[in-house]
Amino acid sequence: MERFAQLAAETLRSVLPLPQTLQVTDLEIPHDPQLGDFAFPCFKLAKQLRKSPPQIAQEIAQEIAQKLPRDEIGETLQVSAVGPYVNFTVPPRVALKSLLKDILSPDTSYGRLSPGSRGTWALEFSSPNVAKPLNIYHLRTTALGAALDRIGRFRGYTVVTLNHLGDWGKQYGMLTVAFRLFGKDQDSVLTMKDLVEMYVKINAMAETDPQIEIEAKQSFLKLEQGDPKITALWKKCVILSIQEFNRQYLRLGVHFDHFWGESFYKDQLAPLLQSLKEKNILIESEGAWIVPVQDEDDKELPPCILQKGDGATIYATRDVAAAIYRYEQFHFDRMTYIVGAEQRLHFKQVFAVLKKMGFAWASHCEHVPTGLYRFKDAKMSTRKGNFVTLEEVLELAKERAITLMTQRQKAAASSPQSPSGGPSSESSDAEQALIAEAVAVGAVVFHDLHTDPVRDVEFDIDRIVNFEGETGPYLQYAHTRCLSILRKAQETQQWTGPVTYNESAVSLLQAPEELNLVKTLGQFPLHLERTLTFAKASQLAHYLLDVTRIFGSFYRECQVLGNPPELTHARLMLVEATRRILGTGLNLLGIPLPERM
Ligand code: ARG
């Protein structure tokens, strides 16, 4: 489909009355396939051309038809104006043949671009603060970042993943005070839980005892000066935290190339401030050092403070240093920070400082804001200690998965016909536990990713861990169903070996559900591209739900097995193509794929 979309974009570019850079991602994918495979909306042109969008659509469609009458257009694309849209449709026969052939290609995954063909993408995500476990809201940035990493690499980018750990600041001074007060030292055997308890307790004590704040400040100062004893305590906390984070990252299949926390940049701050002062970019204001900044529309923003009155640097100082260092290391073409929406202003300020410093690449930096988790009751205030950890949520999901699977097994045992792909009674406890883990991770991660990143996730475990509805397990199950149909084809000797493309079998695919399925599968690369452009995995997640729904109606309407051999083959091609797209798509999202459920 991507080739066709490119053809549509090129054709549009050749006739468009206005010079503009038209990308494939500027084409929309109509929800109703009857309307076409891609559509170009004419709303934006209306103002410049002083014509109504439907009129513009008419004119563009006509011009395309005239200009390229005997060209590829018409053979490979049909063009028409529908209301304010110019619609493009790939003719059914062309679509069936060329899409199925590509999807079933034995050598490569459909939609994959050669590695390293598209520049470097620095992708920062997760970035938790140390001495606290991963909170469920960290899943917003972690799941999205990991998905973009996988999809980016699949689509030819060189992706560098970065974890900007919060490991520097006064609060870590506070933790070293806790070590002293609670009689711990660098050799004490501590777990993450101990650290959290110490942290919560010391913060509570500090609310009534101002002396603790003061000592924490001094302690952090000592840390900044490299005091060996304080540094050893701090390091202990950081290492313990990273070990704990890695345990969760492993569970989710998340990988970081670099754990460069805030402390990593500490020696780069003084020279940075010095040079900014020399260039008069950093100016003194009421004792502090600030950079006056504007946003992209030249609107004044609150100034970016880089050095406080007492000489201390802040979070923003380290972000400016980090961005420069990362550019020096990677010469990235794009740098994305996936961070909570509450830090919007912070990133605007940081990018504006970089721009003021004359870095052209500052315009390639973007903040992707993420929302929170909303629970029915529990509030998620980390400070007071009543936070909901990621691990807790995954365990809860796993318990529910086991309950559901047991119920399904009982139901299957009492009904004479076990549904294909359904729970198998032979599977061992160990296998059950693995499946439950896959279902739990799949359910929680999918639910997060299918919510638009900037919106809050509504958390309701019963809805999330469910084999019905728009859930991860629903998609995992659809994938196992494809596998079980293919297995059954082998067992009944209706097919042997991998299902390969066969041109003459294609002509037997006549049902509208079959065409609809192939066209939808063919859109896979377009949705991957949109996912990357908009940095929203929800794009891919919703597409996979569509695939599953459309596969469902194909499966209901068209019997796959037990037909004359060539028709069985033709339909098995569709099952295999669906399995491939679902499998690849879910993998890219980080959803594990059990073979049976
Ligand atoms: N550690 C920060 C927090 O938990 C997020 C860091 C975001 N990344 C950055 N480069 N500032 O709020």
Image (spheres, grey):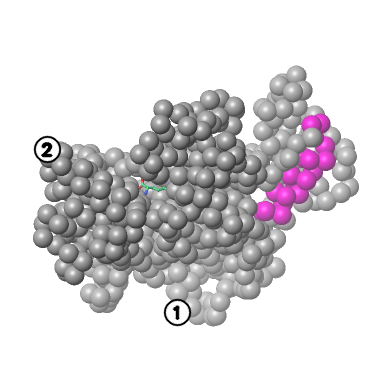
Q: Position of residue 185 (x, y in %)?
A: 17, 64
Looking at this view, is 559 or 32 the one in front? 32
The kind of residue tagged 2 is Thr
Check disc 1 and report its element: helix, strand or loop. helix
Q: Earlier in the sequence, mark 2 or mark 1?
A: 2
* Residue highlighted by disc 1: 491
What is the quadrant of residue 438 in the picture? bottom left
Q: Position of residue 221 (x, y in %)?
A: 30, 50
Residue bounds of the magenta highlight: 1-18
Q: Position of residue 345 (x, y in %)?
A: 45, 34
Within the magenta stretch, is there residue 14?
A: yes
Check disc 2 and report its element: helix, strand or loop. helix
Q: Relative to 519, is 180 on the left or the right?
A: left
Within the magenta stretch, is there residue 377?
A: no
Q: From the image, which quarter does the N terminus lie in?
A: bottom right
Q: Position of residue 441 (x, y in %)?
A: 33, 60
Q: Relative to 36, is 218 on the left or the right?
A: left
Q: Which mark is residue 208?
A: 2
Q: Is residue 315 visible?
A: yes
Distance Cα–Cα, label 2 vs label 1:
73 Å
Magenta stretch: helix, strand or loop mostly: helix
As drawn, 102 above or below 497: above
Q: Kindly report which numbered mark, 2 or 1, lies closer to the viewer in this rendering.
A: 2
Q: Which residue is pictured at 22% across the width and 53% down the height?
A: 175
